[in-house]
Amino acid sequence: MTLVYVGGADLETAAQAFDEAGFAVGGGSGDRVITLDHDAAATLRAADERGERYVLVHVGEPDREPGGSYERAHHRVAREELPDLARRLRTRDRLLVRCVAFGYKHGLPADADWVVDGRFLDNPYWVEELRPLTGLDEKVRDYVLSQPGAGDLIAALGGELEKLLPLYRAQGRSQLTVAFGCTGGRHRSPVLATELASRLRKLEGVEVETDFREI
């Protein structure tokens, strides 16, 4: 069963696209889609508190709502991309692994299954030329990965997940979130999330997404 929340603009069109792909709109059982008509952040917080597993889609331009659908979206799409995304989510038979980067000073991701603390690595923030950059920049990536502990961490995590992902799938899980944290969420954790995602994409039967929450 796949539960999808959709926020953003043109929600009527979004609901129609998911309906045509075979999702139930609103309540019911099986694959279903729920539109976030107002106060998306509160609705998502409530879903997290209930322990719901869901895919969050934001349609259209960014919004300014803290904790809302754009900020937390797994998929950010234009209106014309909705039918293809809905079909892919409806027919997905692979385990989705989300590699999330976050900052501890902003709080842990509510949907994290595994939380990995990257603060043992030297912080690029204290290198003047690296401070304005992020973990998506090559200079920061090289700085983080030049530390022996970074490679050891990714190798150990990757090895464990290769063994455990089939077991998660056998239990009917459709999604697993691995969250990497550092102080601000802009340097070390994006590098680590990217590296693990790159390794996991080589596995069969796994779909991998990255989410850099603080960038």
Image (cartoon, grey):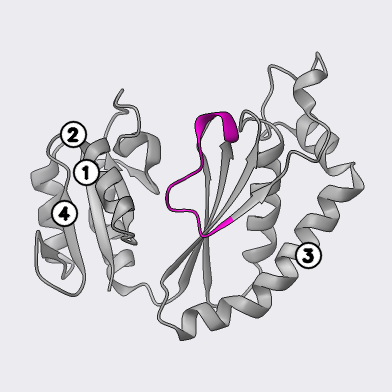
Q: Residue at x 37, y 43 (%)?
A: 73
Q: Residue at x 59, y 35 (%)?
A: 104
Q: Is label 4 in a helix, a strand or a loop?
A: strand
Q: Amino acid at mark 2?
A: Asp
Residue that label 2 marks: 39
Q: Residues within 10 Å of mark 3 (few under 14, many from 20)?
A: few
Q: Is residue 11 left or right of residue 133?
A: left
Residue that label 3 marks: 156
Q: Amino acid at mark 1?
A: Thr
- The answer to the question of whether label 1 and label 2 lie on touching residues, with beta carbons closer than 8 A, is yes
Residue lying furthest front: 49
Q: Which mark is residue 34?
A: 4
Give the distance between the C-alpha atoms of the residues marked 2 and 3, in whole angstroms. Answer: 40 Å
Q: Residues within 10 Å of mark 1 (few under 14, many from 20)?
A: some
Nearest to the observer: residue 107 or residue 20: 107
Q: Amino acid at mark 4?
A: Ile
Q: Is label 2 in a helix, a strand or a loop?
A: loop
Query: Given this view, does label 1 or label 4 mark the residue nearer the observer?
Result: 1
Q: Is label 3 in a helix, a strand or a loop?
A: helix
The percent coordinates of residue 59 (x first, y second) are 26, 40
Q: How many circles with numbers are drawn on the protein?
A: 4
Is residue 80 something one can see in this rendering?
Answer: no
Q: Which residues are magenta?
A: 104-114
Q: Is label 1 in a helix, a strand or a loop?
A: helix
